[in-house]
Amino acid sequence: MSRKSAAKQADPPEALMRFVEENGEVVCYVDVDGKPIAKRYSGQGWISLEPGYTVHGSEPGTDYNTVEIQYDPNAAERQ
């Protein structure tokens, strides 16, 4: 990668994983730039809260130490 193209790449947004108690159950949230984009109840898959975002990882049967956040601007525009 050239120095010029590296300079044009934006820094990735800041992501935060947090745990909140809701109705006596612990819920895991992923926030990007201070905005919740997905949540997951214990033993279940991720629920998208923002169009265009997909979160994978830490679900049952996957690597509990890795969470992957993907953003598709085209999918966000369609919703």
Image (tube, rainbow, N blue to C red):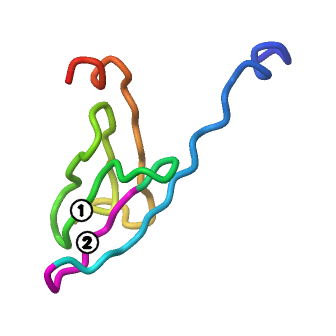
User: Where residue 42 sits in the image (x, y, percent)?
Assistant: 20, 73
Q: Nearer the viewer, residue 73 or 66?
A: 73
The verdict on residue 27 being magenta is yes
In the rendered view, tell whether residue 24 sits above or below residue 56.
below
In terms of secondary structure, where does tag 1 sit? strand
Say left or right for 20 vs 65: left
Question: What amino acid is at disc 2?
Answer: Val
In the rendered view, tell whether residue 6 sits above or below residue 67.
above
The verdict on residue 46 being magenta is no
Residue stretch rendered in magenta on the structure: 23-30
The answer to which image quadrant residue 50 occupies is: top left
Q: Distance between the residues labelled 2 and 1?
A: 6 Å
* Callout 2 crowding tier (Cα within 10 Å): few <14, some 14–19, many ≥20: some
Residue designated by label 2: 27
In terms of secondary structure, where does tag 2 sit? strand
- Mainly helix, strand or loop, the magenta region? strand
User: Where residue 27 sits in the image (x, y, percent)?
Assistant: 25, 71
Q: Which residue lies at the image location 41% right of the left edge and 69% below the top edge?
A: 18
**Seen from this angle, which residue lies furthest bottom?**
24
Q: Nearer the viewer, residue 43 or 41?
A: 41
Q: Do the residues labelled 2 and 1 touch (CB within 8 Å)?
A: yes
- Label annotation for residue 14: none
Query: Which tag, 2 or 1, sits closer to the chain's start?
Result: 2
* Callout 1 crowding tier (Cα within 10 Å): few <14, some 14–19, many ≥20: some
User: Where residue 74 sits in the image (x, y, percent)?
Assistant: 32, 17
Q: Which residue lies at the image location 33% right of the left edge and 37% below the top edge?
A: 53
Residue designated by label 1: 40
Say left or right for 49 vs 30: left
In the rendered view, tell whether residue 27 sits above or below residue 69.
below
